[in-house]
Amino acid sequence: MTSRITLADFAAHGSHQKGHFRLSSGLHSSDYLQCALFLANPARAERAGQQLAEAMASVMVKPDIVVGPALGGLVIGYEVARAFRVPFIFTERVDGRMTLRRGFGIGPKQGIVVIEDVVTTGGSTREVIEIMQSLGGDVIGVGSLVNRSGSPNPFDPVPYVALLEAEFPTWEKADCPLCKIEQPIVKPGSRPVK
């Protein structure tokens, strides 16, 4: 898929950061994409949501509902739902476990699209997919602003699209060259490290 957003777009808004990062997956990296900074501008967030909805519409049917995991999937998920003109709901982590936000629900067989900001290992997204399926929903697609998983579709057989394919090296702590030179590490993002 052709990128609709570039690394230069992220860098222009201070969203592509360089350093030593411990990602939510527990992996280490020298690059971090801070989607919250990129999406902080409402016009840019709206445009990204429209682009992602268009990319998703080209590979699947229109969803009945869009789901995003908090916090990363909130802004982009809302904008994708707005572009599709369907409801948006979200999941959150409570006591270390992903759960549907209190007060939200889905109907049986509703066509669901799961939206995330960045996919690295896909762990959070898989948790959301499992929750939706356990509630009787039909997950018809996954989308993200950025795919840095190294796989064109880490959720196969569910269709997946991303606006930016980014490949940055990641390491387990024991193999991290930045740890070996004792470069200070930062834990960005909102989710605790596994």
Image (cartoon, rainbow, N blue to C red):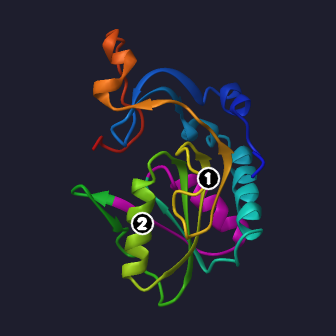
Q: Looking at the image, which is closer to me, 168 or 124?
A: 168
Q: Residue at x 58, y 57 (%)?
A: 153
Task: Examine the image and state in which quarter residue 49 appears.
Answer: bottom right
Q: Position of residue 125 (x, y in %)?
A: 45, 59
Q: Is residue 116 left or right of residue 181?
A: right
| Residue 85 is covered by the magenta coloring | yes
Residue at left offset 68%, top offset 66% = 82
Whichever of labels 1 and 2 marks the residue nearer the N terminus, that label is 2
Task: Give coordinates of residue 53: x percent, y percent.
Answer: 71, 63
Q: Nearer the viewer, residue 87 or 112?
A: 112
Q: Nearer the viewer, residue 102 or 24?
A: 24
Seen from this angle, which residue lies furthest left?
95
Q: Residues within 10 Å of mark 1 (few under 14, many from 20)?
A: some
Where, by quadrant of the figure, is residue 142 drawn? bottom right
Residue under circle 1? 152
Whole-percent x and y of residue 144? 60, 54
Q: Are marks 1 and 2 in contact (CB under 8 Å)?
A: no
* The furthest residue to the top: 181
Q: Is residue 61 left or right of residue 64?
A: right
Which of pointers 1 and 2 indicates the residue nearer the eye?
1
Left or right? Give the position of 52 relative to 130.
Answer: right
Label 1 amino acid? Pro
Magenta residues (range): 71-92
The circle on residue 128 is 2
Residue 84 is a magenta residue: yes
Please, what secondary structure does the residue beneath circle 2 have? Answer: helix
Q: Amino acid at mark 2?
A: Val
